[in-house]
Image (cartoon, rainbow, N blue to C red):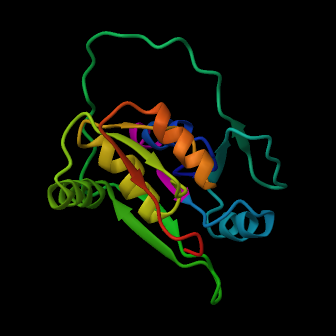
Amino acid sequence: HPFVFNLCTDRYHFLLTFCAALLRGQTSLLPPNHAADTLKRLHSRHPQSYGVSDKALVLEGMEIIPFPALPALETGNFTVPAIAADHVAAIAFTSGSTGEPQPHPKTWGGLVRQAQLEANSLGIRPGLHFLGTVPPQHMYGLESTLMLPLHNGGTLHAGQPLFPADIRQALAELPAPRALITTPLHL
């Protein structure tokens, strides 16, 4: 299929699914939420798609593959694959609060350039540990909690803490230097 709905809630699983889709030449579809009605409407607009989820999720009419168990981490040398700059890596959708969710295609080259611009403007250096409270399927979350560490030698926290005590605990678990990527709850 040319399209994959990335429905993973764990940030690390989301990143692996996103990268696997890139390697397969697919485009990740990033719905604004996982509500059945939203997914059905978006799937009808992209019938040549399937989903990958790390939670038990069933949606009539859409094939959803469970995120696989991960093997033990292997170390060693590897080659970073080249992804065409003009490849549409993701299509993010607006919330649909004013009607149908609107698609916003993002090319791989555009996402990489944005990550480089963010890093330069914020003085991001390799070795920074990122904690995000924003979902990775939203553009701000994708750009700031996945693309920024991926292209600037950072690491990411897999969770998505929401409450202040949970955020403090997650930050305390990360070694310094660390950064908190967040936005007001209403956004």
Quarter of image, res 23 = top left
For the point 49% across and 66% down, the residue is 92
State the image coordinates of residue 169 (x, y, percent, origin top left): 56, 39
**Quick one: 24 or 5, which is closer to the camera?**
5
In this picture, which residue range is highlighted in magenta?
21-29
Near-viewer residue (128 or 79): 128
Q: Position of residue 171 (x, y in %)?
A: 47, 41
Determine which quarter of the picture holds residue 19.
top left
Which residue shows up at 68% across the image and 42% down it?
53
At 24% from the left edge and 56% from the top edge, which residue is drawn? 109
Name the spot of residue 107 as percent of width and height, x first: 32, 60
Q: Is residue 89 magenta?
A: no
Describe residue 56's horizontal placement relative to residue 123 as left or right.
Answer: right
Height in image: 77 above or below 63?
above
Question: 58 or 98, which is in the foreground?
Answer: 98
Does residue 23 show up magenta in the picture? yes
